[in-house]
Image (spheres, helix red, strand yellow):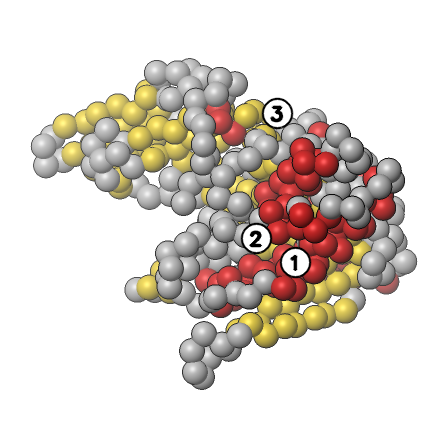
Amino acid sequence: MKTETIALSSASPGTSRTLTRHIWGTEGQRPKIYLQGALHADEMPGAITLWHLMELLDAAESAGRLIGEISVVPFANPIGLTQWVHNKPQGRQDLESMRNFNRHYPDLAALVGDRLEGKLGDDAEQNAKVIRAAFAAALAAETPKSEAEEMRIRLMQWSHAADIVLDLHCDHVALMHFYTSSTRPDLTELLGRATGAKLALIEEISGGNAFDEAHSAPWTALRTRYGARFPIPAACFSTTVEYRGQNDVNDTLAQADAAKLMIFLGAAGAVSGEPAPAYPPAPQKPLGGAGEAFAPQGGIVTWACAPGDEVSAGETIAWVSDPIARRRMAVAAPATGLLFRRELWTHCLAGQSLCNVAGDTILRHGNLLSD
């Protein structure tokens, strides 16, 4: 294993932060796989899973079972890790700008599109090399205006050339699920079969240029621009994996999840000697079909259903009680499908989003990711 640490530019006198990644296998050898955790710095299930994964990677490297290059960034957001307010972590948004740490990544297709004119040919693999080199040059030329922007660029400099990018997150209270595009159905199925995820939410462009989409969407955009003339592969499978809920942090669960990640890495050709994936494929639903239920009033939330329940549109799935007005109002399921996530808090404001139900009918368009 090799460890690399880079310093971020200081945002204020007397302060400094660093990013660290650990690398196993042979650098430059494919498949090249990148994993990171805690980009939302109040989400620890993925980070503790990576702790246990790194121990498994140590053992695999000692046994000579590594084939590709595997990079792990266990804490991808040193800025968010230090942002606590009244003894509560605030790692989802940057307190300086209130921007979500998992949005606003560089649009690589826009940065390199014109530069590729005259450089592509009839060999898809060679075109992928040319495009990745253009990505690297474009990221190196970027001038960040803030520490958070620099962090986004540095993370992408480590990850942009990967064949597979896994960004490990969690929700409030949720089933294990993941978000990805439709461009690599083989790896979408493989990830579900290896990890036992209960749902895959599929969308080409979700909006906001989240970290995972910043890696897959450029290949789609370049294929749209150049595909009629030159072969452009879907060269990066990227996904946001939601490791259940914020309180699902324990070694027993994380050890099991790390072992399943090793199975995925083995099936993807990066590690030898792993067992075959044993789970059924994760059911796939359109992200636009993940309907939201909203609080009809402010008050106390009590649930009639839990993540994992199949519900019908209009069915009462929760109640919101106002003890001052002595009024209780029902919360109806927004769609027929799987209730896969809900909010952690047991009180709410009127109009607040409370949960999502994944169905087959498209209910939402445009920017589909929450802030």
Q: Circle 1 sits in a helix, a strand or a loop, which is it?
A: helix
From the top left corner, tell me how far across and down residue 340 is, in percent: 48, 31
Q: Residue furthest left?
A: 325
Amino acid, disc 2? Pro
Q: Is residue 68 visible?
A: yes
What's the residue at 45%, 17% (across, down)?
336
Q: Which residue is mark 1?
A: 138
From the top left corner, tell me how far across and down residue 86 is, in percent: 30, 64
Image quarter hosting the C terminus: top left
- First along the sequence among labels 3 and 2: 2
Q: Nearer the viewer, residue 273 or 2?
A: 2
Observer-side mark, 3 or 2, equals 2
Indicate whether 288 appears above or below 74: above
> In the drawing, what numbered circle is on residue 127?
none
- First along the sequence among labels 2 and 1: 2
The answer for how far apart the CA atoms under marks 3 and 1 are is 37 Å
The answer to which image quadrant residue 11 occupies is bottom left
From the top left corner, tell me how far across and down residue 249 is, in percent: 53, 52
The answer for how far apart the CA atoms under marks 2 and 1 are is 10 Å
Circle 3 packing at 10 Å, graded few (<14), some (14-19), many (20+), is few
Q: Circle 3 sits in a helix, a strand or a loop, which is it?
A: loop
> In the drawing, what numbered circle is on residue 283?
3
The answer to which image quadrant residue 195 occupies is top right
Observer-side mark, 3 or 1, equals 1
Amino acid, disc 1? Ala
Q: Residue furthest right?
A: 64
Q: Is residue 33 visible?
A: no
What's the residue at 60%, 47% (across, down)?
110
The answer for how far apart the CA atoms under marks 3 and 2 are is 31 Å
Amino acid, disc 3? Pro
Q: Are marks 3 and 2 in contact (CB under 8 Å)?
A: no
Q: Which residue is mark 2?
A: 106
